[in-house]
Image: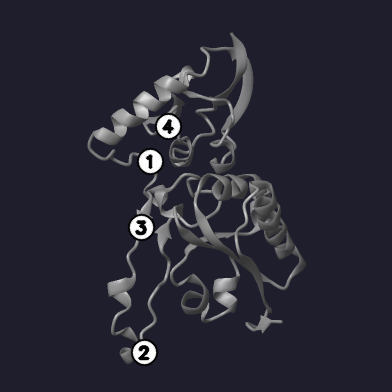
Amino acid sequence: MIRRIIQIDREKCNGCGACASACHEGAIGMVDGKAVLLRDDYCDGLGDCLPTCPTGAISFVEREAAAYDEKAVEENRKKQEASAPAVHTGCPGHRMLRFDRVEETSGKPETGESVSQLGQWPCQIKLVPVHAPYFQGAKLLIAADCTAFSYANLHREFMKGKITLIGCPKLDSVDYSEKLTQILSDNDIRSLTIVRMEVPCCGGLEMAAKKALQASGKFIPWQVVTISTDGRILD
């Protein structure tokens, strides 16, 4: 049958593995350091992988391909879950990690030493997998890149106890709303906090988050905090 399906340009692929992590159907794998479409019938044609690719190596085409087989995808998923944990073969910078900060923070206030409150890796919106397990039951923080440098207490006041996603709509030149909608729709997000800078370009991050919240159709408590360029919280 003729249908929409992804294609991967091996010349553009840098082997980061972000697309393989984003594809929850298991259609994409890493072979010889490059991303490849493993099976046509695993690709649903929705394109979760497209916004994660930093080089634009993935695109849609209309071609002869086997129909999407949801049953085969589910059987493969169960097989993978039953086996030993898969070895991450992509870029080490995209490997999913979860950090337990409880023990690390105990006793630290006495020494005055600052401790990171980043709860997971990766944290860039473009790189984080939509169906990462740490999203379940999470309090979500969406922060502009510059906020961590402008506001000294971002870790303690905003990141502690949350899953943090960061981005810059101006530098990334992308609309985050589609991916954020998927994250909010497909996971049990308990609350949403948006921390942005006062500069106009940061409005894109706030609008993307609000658009995603509306599109998700869920009632999730949310708030927006604006940081001034000299490091103050603005009312």
Q: Is residue 88 visible?
A: yes
- How far apart are the two marked residues, 2 and 4, measured between alpha carbons? 45 Å
- Marks 2 and 1 in Cβ contact (< 8 Å): no
Tell me which numbered mark, 3 or 4, is placed earlier along the sequence.
4
Q: Are marks 3 and 2 in contact (CB under 8 Å)?
A: no
Q: Which residue is mark 1?
A: 90
In terms of secondary structure, where does tag 2 sit?
A: loop
Disc 4 is placed on an element classified as strand
- Identify the amino acid type marked 3: Arg
Closer to the camera in the image, 194 or 14: 194
Q: Which mark is residue 224?
A: none
Per the model, the C-alpha gap separating discs 3 and 4 is: 26 Å
Mark 1 and mark 3 lie on one chain; the one further toward the N terminus is 1
Q: Residues within 10 Å of mark 1 (few under 14, many from 20)?
A: many
Q: Residue at horizontal 59%, vertical 30%?
A: 46
Q: Mark 3 or mark 2: which is in front?
A: 3
Residue assigned mark 2: 112
Q: What's the distance in space between the residues labelled 1 and 3, CA to CA?
A: 18 Å
Q: CA distance from mark 2 to mark 1?
A: 38 Å
Q: Quadrant of residue 195?
A: bottom right
Residue identifier under label 3: 98
